[in-house]
Amino acid sequence: MAYQPSTPAYHPEQTRVCPKCKGPVERVRRRFIDRLISLITPVQRYRCRAKGWGCDWEGNLR
Ligand SMILES: [Zn+2]
């Protein structure tokens, strides 16, 4: 759940990658909590495409 903003080599805009495995991510429908967060900070929820294949990351990216 908690997105950890600790990855220094994080890519800027456009190319969103999984902060865990650097793989591609896909947008997923936001949850209620995300809408609340978006009232303060616009975010999109993403999920790693490798989900189920070794990486289970899902979280919010701007
Ligand atoms: Zn991943």
Image (cartoon, rainbow, N blue to C red):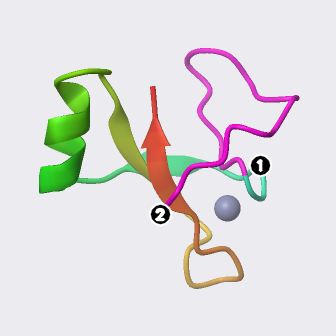
Report whether 31 appears left or right of 13: left
* Nearer to us: label 1 or label 2: 2
In what quadrant does ligand 1 lie?
bottom right
In the image, 56: left or right of 23? left
In the rendered image, residue 58 lying in the magenta stretch gets the answer no
Q: CA distance from mark 1 to mark 2?
A: 17 Å
Name which quarter of the figure residue 56 lies in: bottom right
Residue type highlighted by circle 2: Met
Residues rendered magenta in the picture? 1-19
Position in image of residue 34 (x %, y %): 24, 45
- Residue 5: x, y in percent? 68, 37
Give above or below for 57 relative to 9.
below
* Mark nearer the N terminus (1 vs 2): 2
Q: Position of residue 55 (x, y in %)?
A: 67, 74
Q: Is residue 42 above or below residue 45?
A: above
Give the numbered dot on residue 22.
1
Asked which secondary structure carries label 2, the reply is: loop
- Within 10 angstroms of label 2, few (less than 14), some, or many (20 or more) residues? few
**Quarter of the rendering occupied by the C terminus:** top left
Taking the spot 34% from the left edge, 30% from the top edge, the residue there is 43
Q: Amino acid at mark 1?
A: Lys
Left or right of 6: which side holds 43? left
Residue at horizontal 65 percent and vertical 41 percent from the top: 17
At x 81%, y 38%, the residue is 7
Mark 1 Cβ and ligand 1 under 8 Å apart: yes
Q: Principal SS element in the magenta part?
A: loop
